[in-house]
Image (cartoon, grey):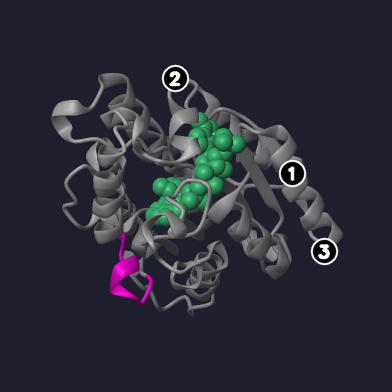
Amino acid sequence: MNVTEETGGHPVALVAGASSGIGAAVARRLAARGSAVALVGRREAELKEVAESIRAAGGTALPLPLDLAEPGAPAEAVAATAAGLGPVGLLVCSAGAIRLAAIHETEERHWERQLRINLTVPFLLAREVLPGMRERRYGWVVNIGSGVGSEVVPGSGGYGVSKHAVHRLTELVHEENRDLGIRAVTVAPGWVSTRLAARPSDLGVPEEEVLDAEDIADTVAWLLDRPARMSVGPLVRVEPSASRAAAGDAMTRHLTRSRDRGAGPTQNAGTEPAAKETP
Ligand SMILES: NC(=O)c1ccc[n+]([C@@H]2O[C@H](COP(=O)([O-])OP(=O)(O)OC[C@H]3O[C@@H](n4cnc5c(N)ncnc54)[C@H](OP(=O)(O)O)[C@@H]3O)[C@@H](O)[C@H]2O)c1
């Protein structure tokens, strides 16, 4: 019996960064498809809200309030999921930190923070779940990358570097495990309307031209529905159709606008979360 048989055909899922935005939308979608879902993030109230919405729709959710940047927290998340729901068969890493600045203006602590959340946390989570997946010969590792991880966008700084690296991490996971029933894919979105991103209206872009978190949840669900013989990726880019909403372009305009408004280089992510990520 493999893990999907044990769980009625749907793998137990762990979603890192499930308290809002893309992670919350993906978690809801996975639960609607039948997975029991562990929800990881720092904001307990938001996690509980997501869990409640999943339960109200008849699903199973386990909120796990944890700061994944803390030593041991990724292992704790995986162990708590296994104890509460069963072994992780589907890992989605959507936790993210952003602090935009040119390299010569990037503070070391911001660099380290982004590398920690956007790269080291996905590595530690993958390292934790892969042995069990390899043993059970089944698993999915889905990392949320970024369009600016594939394009060289001046000012994308430690964020762009960490996303570029997480794309490679996913490729390695894919190549090392593809003959063991494990699929790994990076879903790399362009501009998605969440609290992490610039507001479309600030850049003169109509809201409807920017992606929605549900678009990314749709993409993940579509990938999961592919037959076992089929692997799409390991990098799947999802961009708005309109060129003025394309990730690289929009980020460049956003940085220029922040500079024009006199924001310091490390305060100019223009997004509340960027400020909150600052240790
Ligand atoms: N929005 C976009 O335009 C866009 C484009 C490309 C890629 N992405 C990527 O998409 C992913 C999700 O971002 P989003 O746009 O959905 O924004 P979001 O709503 O701010 O989601 C970020 C998530 O990361 C979690 N997180 C951050 N630091 C954490 C930590 N130390 N420990 C645990 N969880 C942590 C946050 O939860 P807590 O605050 O509760 O800890 C939150 O759930 C990120 O990886 C981001 O880089 C976004």
Q: Considering only order in the chain, which callout, 3 or 1, is on the residue closer to the N terminus?
A: 3
> Per the image, is 1 magenta?
no
Residue 161 lies, in percent from the top left, at 23, 42
Q: Amino acid at mark 1?
A: Leu
**Kind of element beneath mark 3:** loop
Residue 261, located in which quarter of the rendered image? Answer: top left
How far apart in space, not on screen, are marks 2 and 1 (Cα)? 27 Å
Q: Amino acid at mark 2?
A: Pro
Q: Quadrant of the N terminus?
A: bottom right
Q: Nearer the viewer, mark 3 or mark 2?
A: 2
Task: Determine if residue 1 is in view.
Answer: no
Q: Which mark is residue 47?
A: none
Front-most of 155 and 85?
155
Q: Which mark is residue 279?
A: 2
Q: Which mark is residue 57?
A: 3
Residue at position x 40%, y 78% in the image = 230
**Kind of element beneath mark 1:** strand
Q: Which residues are magenta?
A: 240-247
* Residue bearing mark 1: 62
Q: Amino acid at mark 3?
A: Ala
